Structure formats: C-alpha cells, structure tokens
Amino acid sequence: MTPKTPIEVTAQPLATAGQPQLLVISCPHCGATHRHLTAGERHAPCGAKYTVVAPREEQP
C-alpha cells in the first residue's frame, strides 16, 4: 500500500515581531486558521497533515 500524499495548501505570509510565519487561512480538515514557521509537510493542531506551500514572491 502506498502512503497517502498530503494535501498542498498555499499559505499567506505573516509578519510578526519575532520572525516571519506562514498562515494557512482555511485548514482543509477543520476550516480553522493555523500558523507555521516554515513551509513543507506539517501537522496542524487539529491533527490534519498537509504540505504548506509558501506564496511566490511577485516580480516587479
């Protein structure tokens, strides 16, 4: 049996006083907002497993 590939979610950048974070606006599992420090495969507080994709920087 092959492992299930996590869902990809695009995060929004969040500027904080400490360090930049990534904000998943609507979790595909529970619909809540979750914060993550880095992109990649993550586990949300609700137990969801997904791949956080950082937004592309817009070119001028």
Image (cartoon, grey):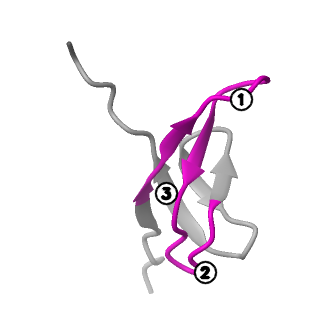
Occupied quadrant, residue 7: bottom left
Marks 1 and 3, Cα distance to the nearest angstrom?
A: 22 Å
Q: Earlier in the sequence, mark 2 or mark 1?
A: 1
Marks 3 and 2, Cα distance to the nearest angstrom?
A: 15 Å
Say what secondary structure mark 2 lies in: loop
Q: Earlier in the sequence, mark 3 or mark 2?
A: 2
Q: Position of residue 2 (x, y in %)?
A: 43, 79
Q: Quick one: quadrant of the N terminus?
A: bottom left
Residue at 79% in and 24% down = 18
Say what secondary structure mark 1 lies in: loop
Residue on which disc 3 sits:
51
How many dots with numbers?
3
On residue 16, the disc is 1
Left or right position of 34 against 51: right
Say what secondary structure mark 3 lies in: strand
Residue on which disc 2 sits:
30
Give the residue type at disc 1: Thr
Mark 3 crowdedness (10 Å alpha carbons): few <14, some 14-19, many ≥20: some
Residue at 48% in and 48% down = 11
Q: Which residues are magenta?
A: 9-33
From this view, report whether residue 24 is shown above or below residue 27.
above
Residue at 47% in and 69% down = 6
